[in-house]
Image (cartoon, rainbow, N blue to C red):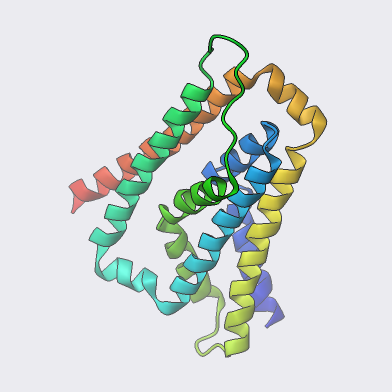
Amino acid sequence: MTATLTTIAALHWVVLITPGVNLMLVSQLAADGQQRAAIYTCFGITTVTLTWALLALLGVSALFAAHPQLRLGLQIMGGLYLCYVALRLWQAGAPAAGASQPARLTRWAAFRIGVLTNIMNPKSALFFGSVFATALPLAPAPSLLIAAVALVYLNALLWHLFLALAFSHPQVQAAYARQRSLLNRTAGLVVGAFGLRLLAATAQELRSR
């Protein structure tokens, strides 16, 4: 059991620490002085992580394989949503008349953006499906399944909470405040690139069918 969980944890951490949209959103909110919003975004992201992990055990990856149009449709919505988030970030970085402060996210809005950002990525379900299929034995005990799901949830929660707290450090916030416009626009470009890449990959897959 320990060896199985160690394998799952190692594979999951490789994905977690790879820069992506979730990391970008949490760190950007925290550095902008919205630590509470960053933390609730973490809760939204990890709620979906838990959901995808459970669905992977229930065979949603097989469902996506049998009906790829479901996955492709979700990927298109995800790509469009990321482009929308990128546009909002870019607009937040635009110079404005007066010393206006960026809008603060409510707890619910922060949780929702975490959920939407992560749930629009069906590749998470495919990742968990492949990891579980590789690492778990043929007939895993219920206790092992519960431990595997709890492990990936705790991994994701700890990592994203660490980002929220680390980027809330006063020195990080001071540096961010000096370059808010540039960093917001940079974040917008990065998130937009992820969205466009997802749309391009989906379009290429549709053409090859």
Relative side of 83 to 73, left or right: right
Pick out the residue farthest to the top: 97
In this figure, what is the number of numbered marks?
A: 0
Q: Quadrant of the N terminus?
A: bottom right
Q: Quadrant of the C terminus?
A: bottom left
Relative side of 194 to 44, left or right: left
Depth order, front residue of 145/97: 97
Depth order, front residue of 198/76: 76
Q: Position of residue 9 (x, y in %)?
A: 65, 66
Relative side of 33 to 16, left or right: right
Identify the residue at image location x=63%, y=58%. 156
From this view, report whether residue 204 is shown above or below residue 131.
above
From this view, report whether residue 170 is shown above or below residue 159.
above
Q: Position of residue 5 (x, y in %)?
A: 66, 74
Depth order, front residue of 40/45: 40
From this view, report whether residue 193 is shown above or below residue 51.
above
Q: Locate residue 104: give its quadrant.
A: top right
Q: Locate residue 84: give its quadrant.
A: top left
Q: Position of residue 47 (x, y in %)?
A: 55, 62
Depth order, front residue of 161/203: 161
From this view, report whether residue 166 is shown above or below residue 72.
above
Identify the residue at image location x=81%, y=31%. 170
Identify the residue at image location x=58%, y=18%. 181
Q: Position of residue 143 (x, y in %)?
A: 62, 87
